[in-house]
Amino acid sequence: MMEKKNNYVFTFLSIVAWVIFVGLCIEAGALIVNFLYSLFKPQIIQNLYQKLDLSELYTMSKWAYFNMYTFILAISILKAYLFYLVIILISKLDLARPFNSFVSKQITQISYFTLSIGLLSSLAQHTTKNLMHRGFEVDTLDRFWADSEAFILMSAIIYIIATIIKRGIEIQNENDLTV
């Protein structure tokens, strides 16, 4: 009975992870296409994806525009890749032997990418504040990195879980040798 319930939960989690992954890929793809298109046709900048009007920023400083858009692209691509890693973990997780090196490595890698997203988002927040102090209108960009602290905290929790699993593998290997 419990195994059936776990299968349903993992199937549901897999579907949710795929939906989030596809959504993040669409967002990242749209942002990439918009950015590339804006390089050749700067006049469309005010009509970018998600009503991301960076035309004033582009007019005031192309360097600031490219900088901020690079943050947006990097964070969106990292988020999509993070959920790709989650999908791989869910699809290859064996509940009969959950403590294995693949799971440990995958969860550790997920924690590193989560930390990268958090740190990059935090850096983008500070850059945005700096640009705002210099008179640039970039307050609409906060939605792309408003959750930086959450990602940093989440990465710490995920890393702790990865460390516990790694220790579980060591204990499991010791028990296998003893028996």
Image (cartoon, grey):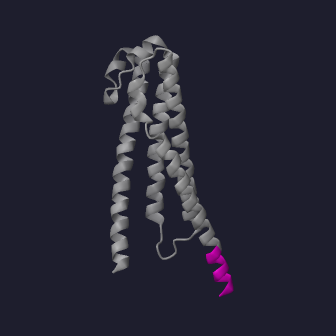
Q: Quadrant of the C terminus?
A: bottom right
**Residue ID at (33%, 29%):** 49
> From the viewer's perspective, is 110 left or right of 170?
left
The residue most toward the bottom is 179
Residue 134 versus residue 3 in the image, above or below: above
Task: Please indicate, yes or no, whether residue 17 appears anywhere in the rendered image.
Answer: yes
Residue 115 versus residue 50 in the image, above or below: below
Task: Please indicate, yes or no, whether residue 67 appears anywhere in the rendered image.
Answer: no
Relative image position of residue 90 (x, y in whole percent)? 44, 62
**Residue ID at (36%, 78%):** 2
Q: Number of numbered discs present?
A: 0
Residue 5 is one of the magenta-drawn residues: no
Viewer-proximal residue among 145 and 72: 145
Relative image position of residue 151 (x, y in whole percent)? 49, 46
Relative image position of residue 97 (x, y in whole percent)? 52, 75
Viewer-proximal residue among 145 and 21: 145
Q: Of helix, strand and loop, which mostly describes the magenta segment?
A: helix
The residue most toward the top is 60
Residue range highlighted in magenta: 171-179
Residue 175 is one of the magenta-drawn residues: yes
